[in-house]
């Protein structure tokens, strides 16, 4: 699988005509997304922490092509605080899009200028460089809305650009109202966690996500152009087999496309 300079070169050289975009999976919920000439890093997890099963595919200082860095919530495999300062130095124009509830603390603790952060909350949108990023509250396993400010700590993002729409769900379970929010967009690609949740994991403070059946049924209601399962490959104690998800999609929603991305390999996405 391409890593390091080879991966960066593939991203830089990839052509995405209007109505198309490209994805590169780096494990867990970590993706590179290219829309036209704009490159977005979604939950980039680049730290070599103990126990990870997929080695970091990039060094943070290699990330010189980022236009945006999106973090869905404050867990190391989603907002990798140890890597973000080096990414900020390497991609000096990158904007860091995060839950607004975390924006001030992330700036203080990473040393990244507050001017480089865009804080979002459920229903809010940030637009720059021809890209629109809209936030949708995520329930991991609960919404955990902050009582004082009304802001949410966990988000998913709808990313619109170059004629395409991509939904990166972050870590979430289904909750009442989620489908209604997401139906506003003609989603070309939906990236959904499938590792599930159970008592054994919760007892170890491992907060859960949708089961593969719940993720498939969400896709069945949204009917995206393609559904991509994620968040199942990185840690042995919090993983899942994606094959039952693919089989369930094929049997229950045969009209819908579902694929498992290959680590580091380009996946082209068309507009819905």
Image (cartoon, helix red, strand yellow):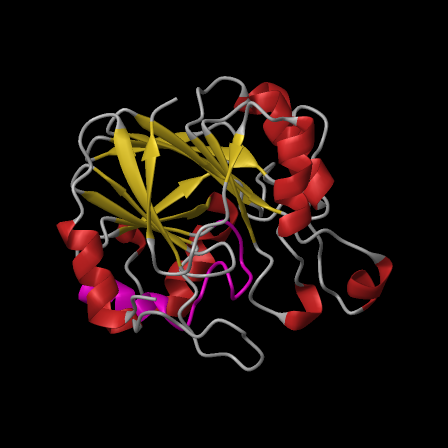
Total marks shown come to: 0
Q: Position of residue 79 (x, y in %)?
A: 46, 60
Q: Residue 90 location in percent, x, y?
A: 19, 66
Residue, far bottom: 50
Q: Does the rendering let one see residue 147?
A: no
Residue located at (59% from left, 30% from top):
219
| x and y, in percent, of residue 223 in the image | 54, 23
**Residue appearing at x 79%, y 61% in the figure:** 202
Query: Which residue is nearer to you in this view: 214 or 257?
Result: 257
88 falls in the magenta region: yes
Look at the image and tell me in which quarter the C terminus lies: top left
Q: Which residues are magenta?
A: 72-90
200 left or right, relative to 101: right
Q: Please indicate whether residue 264 sits to the left or right of residue 123 in the image.
A: left
Question: Which is more toward the observer, 143 or 130?
Answer: 130
Above/below status of 16 relative to 140: above
Residue 256 magenta-highlighted: no
Front one among 23 and 170: 23
Instruction: Tell me what residue is drawn at x 65 percent, y 44 percent.
Output: 245
The secondary structure that dominates the magenta segment is loop
Q: Quadrant of residue 112?
A: bottom left
- Relative to the observer, which residue lies in front, 156 or 15? 15
| Residue under the point 30% across and 73% down | 59
Q: Quadrant of the N terminus?
A: bottom left
Is 161 positioned to the left or the right of 102 in the image? left
Percent x, y for residue 7?
25, 63
Where 106 falls versus 256 (above or below)? below
Residue 60 visible here: yes
Residue 122 falls left or right of residue 16: right
């Amino acid at each position: 699988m391409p890593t390091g300079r080879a991966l960066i070169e593939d991203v830089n050289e990839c052509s995405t005509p209007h109505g198309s975009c490209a994805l590169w999976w780096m494990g867990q919920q970590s993706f590179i997304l290219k829309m036209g000439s704009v490159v977005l890093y979604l939950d980039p997890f680049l730290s070599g922490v103990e126990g990870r099963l997929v080695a970091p595919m990039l060094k943070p200082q290699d990330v010189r092509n980022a236009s945006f860095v999106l973090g869905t919530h404050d867990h190391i495999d989603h907002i990798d605080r140890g890597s973000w300062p080096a990414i900020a130095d390497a991609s000096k124009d990158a904007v860091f899009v995060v839950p607004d509830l975390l924006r001030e603390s992330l700036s203080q603790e990473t040393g990244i200028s507050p001017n480089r952060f865009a804080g979002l909350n459920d229903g809010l949108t940030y637009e720059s460089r021809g890209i629109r990023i809209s936030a949708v509250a995520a329930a991991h396993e609960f919404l955990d809305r902050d009582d004082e400010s009304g802001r949410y700590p966990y988000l998913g993002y709808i990313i619109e650009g170059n004629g395409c729409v991509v939904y990166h769900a972050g870590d979430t379970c289904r909750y009442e109202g989620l489908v209604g929010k997401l139906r506003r967009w003609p989603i070309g690609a939906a990236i959904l966690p499938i590792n599930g949740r159970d008592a054994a994991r919760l007892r170890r403070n491992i907060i859960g996500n949708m089961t593969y059946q719940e993720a498939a049924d969400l896709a069945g209601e949204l009917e995206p152009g393609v559904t991509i399962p994620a968040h199942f490959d990185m840690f042995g104690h919090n993983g899942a087999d994606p094959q039952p998800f693919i089989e369930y999609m094929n049997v229950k929603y045969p009209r819908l496309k579902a694929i498992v991305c290959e680590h580091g390999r380009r996946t082209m996405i068309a507009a819905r």
